[in-house]
Image: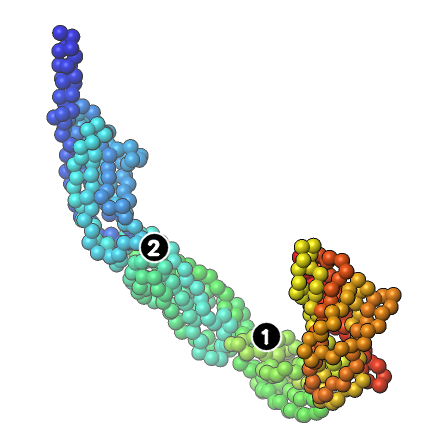
Amino acid sequence: MKNKISTTLIFVLLLPIVFAQAATIEKISSSAVVSPLGEAKFEMKITNPNSFADTFMLELSDVLWSIRTENMPDFTTGVSLNSKESKTITVYLKPNSKLSSGTYYLELRAKSLETRAYQSEVFMVKIDPKVVDYKITIPVEILEPLSIDPAKTNSVKLRIKNPYPVYLEGITVSASSKFLNKDAVVDVEPESEKIIDFSLNIDESTPKQEDDVTITVTQLNREIASAKETIYIKEYRQPYRVDDKVTSKFLQTVHEITFTNTEGAEKTRDASFEKPRTRALILTSPLAKTEMFNNQAYLVWQDVTLKADETYKVVVKEDYRPLAGAAAIIIIIIAAYYFMRSPIIVKKKAYAVHKKDTGNNEIKVLVYIKNRTGDTIEKVRVLERLPIIHKVEPDFGAGTPEPKFRRGHEGIVLDWDIVLAPHEERIFTYKIKSALPIVGEHTLRPTVVQYGHANKRTSSEPYRIILE
């Protein structure tokens, strides 16, 4: 009897779940057009038709879209509804940056936590890069020039970069300063840049000064970029008449420059002269500053005051003597090296050719000798010094004459007497064995070569060999 009551009770408790229905979704809006940077906004009404309270989780079928809700603190907690309760919520769907432009149909599910049943609706979202539904900032900069000559017609170039996958259509670019007040309306394609050229006409009588330029870029009356730069207005048009008298001297070119005020009134201006493009040392009297303008260097004497028809004289020297002196020193050093260097090249190498259980004890030695001159060198003596523990094998390499042997308290000396023809090369090879096993680093003494009637000497470097 008790079992029947328990079964009936369980059946009664499970009956609402068995006949439970999924949540109903009523779309208040079902389509939207957004930019790649924007979010699609939808409103929908969710109703719990069941006789028990439930929580419905919101899920998207496409993982390349993200979802958030406006009137819930966290959409992952779901929409909690009592029995027969309805709630209107606002959902935002945002595309991934990898998605291209086009129309997408997204399935949005409301899944019950109690029964796992779900109801879904399809929403249409069109991605259009020309839609403006975002807030961004973009970089803008002044490219050139930063120095302006009032005597020329100049322009200020701006660069606007659009790093985003959206069209920037009808954006307004404004440049404002004392000498520049201009606007332009331009379009910038996605992930590209735009160069804008603002003409700049300044009266040639404008004195030297600085002009602070402010650049502002707006989209739909909202600022998206700004930059500030200082432009330097300089007087590289000549305020004075310039006469250049050139005189050539030994390793020198002298410019005697005369600046003349040809106007009828006193004035104070910078006197400037194009700096000679030369590797020579430039000397000026009086001392001048060097300034760059339009990639050209100028010698400038600042604030020169001249009355009407008054002159101002300067001297500019192109002095090649330091350059010539440095070249002469280099030539002397090279000549001294060739004159003083040994006419014979000596090199030495060695390697182990035999190994016993107790370690390496046989070494092959090669001595390379070359006459680097075009003359025959007579009375060439090649000396090899070996420690007393070494024994020279009688088998010498091909082309190696048998040397004279001398023994002393310091060891064995191998002595060859040869004659070297012009540019001749000789290789001496021999083998040595040690009376004791050698393991680790072993250093062979330098090979000494004596030559000529004065017995001049040269030698190789000591040679270190690692024996394992």
Count of picture labels: 2
Three-letter amino acid code of the residue under disc 2? Arg
Does residue 266 appear in this view? no
Q: Residues within 10 Å of mark 1 (few under 14, many from 20)?
A: some
| Residue drawn at point x = 53 percent, y = 81 percent | 237
Where residue 368 appears, x then y in whole percent?
Answer: 70, 76
CA gap, disc 1 and disc 2: 41 Å
| Residue drawn at point x = 77 percent, y = 66 percent | 391
Who is closer to the viewer here, 186 or 10?
A: 10
**Please, what secondary structure does the residue beneath circle 2 have?**
strand
In the depicted structure, whether residue 346 falls above or below residue 132: below
Q: What colouring style does the render use?
A: rainbow
Say which quadrant the C terminus sits in. Answer: bottom right
Image-quadrant location for residue 114:
top left
Q: In the rendered view, does 250 fall on the left or right side of 290?
A: right
| Residue drawn at point x = 72 percent, y = 83 percent | 371
Q: In the rendered view, does 14 fall on the left or right side of 250?
A: left
To which residue does mark 2 refer?
222
Where residue 10 appears, x then y in whole percent?
Answer: 16, 17
| Residue drawn at point x = 20 percent, y = 51 percent | 104
Where residue 184 appears, x then y in whole percent?
Answer: 34, 67
Q: In the rendered view, does 104 fall on the left or right side of 197?
A: left
Image-quadrant location for residue 4:
top left
To which residue does mark 1 refer?
291
* Identity of the residue furthest to the top in this view: 1
